[in-house]
Structures are given as structure tokens and as C-alpha cells.
Image (cartoon, rainbow, N blue to C red):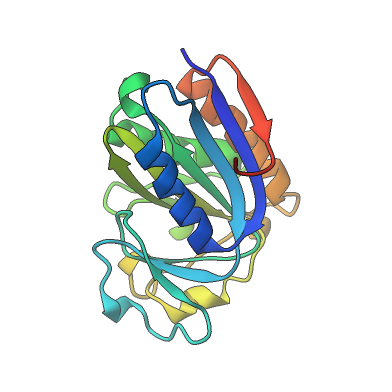
Amino acid sequence: MTDVIIRRLGQQPYEPIFEAMQRFTDERDGETLDEIWVLEHDPVFTQGQAGKEEHLLAPGDIPVVKVDRGGQVTYHGPGQLVVYLLLNLKRLKIGVRDLVTLMEKSVVHVMDHYGIEAYPKADAPGVYVNEEKLASLGLRVRRGCSFHGMALNVDMDLAPFQRINPCGYPGLNMVQAKQLASAATVADISDILVRYLTAELGYNCASEKQQLD
């Protein structure tokens, strides 16, 4: 099994990272190592490929970016842990559904660490606690390689979610880890999540970098 590069990128504007993901995926070949990008974003709404304008209620001063992942509209902002999975699925011998299930399980694992019961829902992708949404998922696969990933609410301002129908569901309430477990931090959760993902995906070694090449 191959190695993986973990990039801890801090807080970043959305569009340059989106463009970098696309470029990485377009340029990679069979020898390119997989990468997992861990970061937070400046405030932004992202609208998936099937996104309907009716779910943008009142974006106001927060920019809206149309992207090529699946799903509807969601919000990213400081205090939300975003994990992008740039993986060669053919090499890993896993399918898209396998990766979605793994992302869901990783969030359930994190919350179990804090004694909180989280769960996925078959009819509404993501991870929930008491019917409130904790984490959103969205992937794109090109030439057998994935990009985009998941966003886990940790310690953020949830108010902007009220300006949209999150993931296309009117009235859906959002929740964050800090409300459920006061000890939760972005740094701690990112460590738990990355350890789980790299172990489950079976990488030999994970090397860490603080920026994009």
C-alpha cells in the first residue's frame, strides 16, 4: 500500500483551494501520492452541481461559489473543520459509496471519542446528532480519483446556515461539536479524524506538510 501526504493548511479562502484541488486531480498520474487536506475556510456558501437557487434564501454579504461536487448548498466558515480527500480510488480498490461510508464512520468515531452518539441517515447524506446536522459530505470523482470531502461543524458561528436551506432541506437545524462536548476543538478533532482515516485506508506512512507545493 502507498503512503499519503497530510496537508494542514490553516484558514484559507475557498476559491484558490477549490482550483488547487481541480488542478491536482487533473495533473496527477498513477504514481502520485494521495493527499488529505485539513483546513478551515473564510466564510462562503458553496452550491453543488445540482444546486437550486431556491435554497439560497438570503446570502447577503457572504459570497456564493458554484462548484463541481455533488449536493446542494452549504456554508463554510472559521471553526468548521474541512477535510478534502484527494485519493486514487482505483489504487485503493474502493468505490465512491465505500468512501462516503468511511467519511460518515470517521465522524461517528470522532464523536464517540467525546461520548456523543452520532449517526448517518440513508435518505439524507451527512452525520447527525439528535436529528440535527453535524457534518456535510460532498464528493467528485474524476478519472477514478476523488476530491472535495467533508465539513464538520466544531466551534463556529452557525447563524449563516439560516440564510440557506442547508443541503437543500428547509428548516434543517445544524449543530456543532462544541455544543455537544465542551472539550471539542478543531485541532483535536482533526487529529482524531486524520488518524482514523489513514488507518482505515491502510496507508503505510503519513507525512505532514503545512502548505501546498
Q: Classify the position of the C terminus by image quarter.
A: top right
Please indicate whether residue 10 sits to the left or right of residue 81 in the image: right
Rendered location of residue 6, percent (x, y): 60, 34
Rendered location of residue 177, percent (x, y): 62, 54
- Residue lying at 48% horizontally and 77% vertically, measured from the top left: 63
- Residue lying at 71% horizontally and 42% vertically, measured from the top left: 188
> In the depicted view, which residue is nearer to us: 187 or 16?
16
Asked whether residue 80 appears in the rendered view, the answer is: no
Vertical comparison of 76 with 102: above or below: below
> In the depicted view, which residue is nearer to us: 166 or 209?
209
- Residue lying at 67% horizontally and 57% vertically, measured from the top left: 178
> Quadrant of the rendered structure where residue 72 is?
bottom left
Vertical comparison of 33 with 175: above or below: above
Please indicate whether residue 210 sits to the left or right of residue 204 in the image: right
- Residue lying at 45% horizontally and 82% vertically, measured from the top left: 59
> In the depicted view, which residue is nearer to us: 21 or 164?
21
Rendered location of residue 153, percent (x, y): 57, 57
